[in-house]
Image (spheres, rainbow, N blue to C red):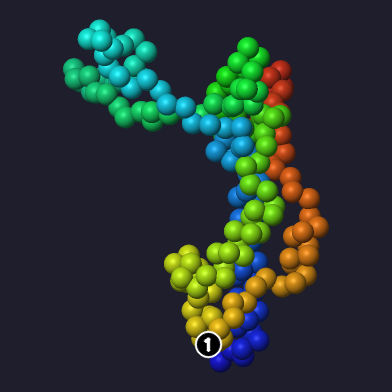
Amino acid sequence: MKSPDAIRDRVRFLLTEELDRRQAEAQRRLPHLCSHNRRHSLDHRKTVGGDPNPSWNHISRYDGDQKVHLPVQQTMGLCFYGADSPEDWQGTICEDPIDAQRCPLFDALTSKEEVLYLFTRDTSDLHWLREHMPEVYSLLWVLDEPEVITVPWWRRVLYRLLRWNPEPLRTVDPLALPPEV
């Protein structure tokens, strides 16, 4: 049988893991996590005014003699950095993770304060804990205490002192040879 202090330590450990997971997720260099990235719809009309639409977005393949149309995502990611001046805006496509990993203009969508605020809000709600962190919820039920346990004070201080850096910029030298096997 575990003591109440051991159960509280386990809850603190699980909450610290959740905070670390959220911090790592917010710092990932992905297109949808950049403040400049917007989804733009593609032209999905097969015909325009009764005429075939040459810019209709589709992918087709032949399965034997039959032409099969494959589903296509009807939006694409664009970098809207500098979009306020259309003559200077480049309209760069930022769709794949490698696009964001190579982008020097990447700006994380969520700040360190937002991640901590959302974490505190979520973990103080028992209904959210029951849905998303059932182990923490069950341990709190065993303790039968009305207050929600938070991460250790030293971890919160350390979180506030650490620098908030997204993943490093990935550069590729096109002239470099692949490593020998």
Residue type, numbered disc 1: Asp
Q: Dot 1, how many residues are within 10 Å of its Cα: few (below 14), some (14-19), or many (20+)?
A: few
**In what quadrant of the picture does the N terminus appear?**
bottom right
Q: Residue furthest top?
A: 51
Depicted 82 relative to depicted 107: above or below:
above
Q: Position of residue 71 (x, y in %)?
A: 31, 29
Using residue 78 as the reference point, say whether residue 72 is left or right of it. left
Q: Residue furthest front?
A: 84
Depicted 145 relative to depicted 103: above or below:
below
Q: Position of residue 138 (x, y in %)?
A: 49, 79
Residue 140: quarter of image: bottom right
Provide the residue designation for mark 1: 144
Using residue 50 as the reference point, say whether residue 21 is left or right of it. right
* Whether residue 170 can be seen here: no
Q: Position of residue 51 (x, y in %)?
A: 25, 7
Using residue 53 as the reference point, say whether residue 171 is left or right of it. right
Q: Position of residue 24 (x, y in %)?
A: 64, 52
Q: What secondary structure is found at the residue carrying circle 1?
A: loop
Q: Nearer the viewer, residue 95 or 85?
A: 85
Q: Nearer the viewer, residue 5 or 159?
A: 159
Residue 81: quarter of image: top right
Residue 124: quarter of image: bottom right
Q: Nearer the viewer, residue 130 or 29?
A: 130
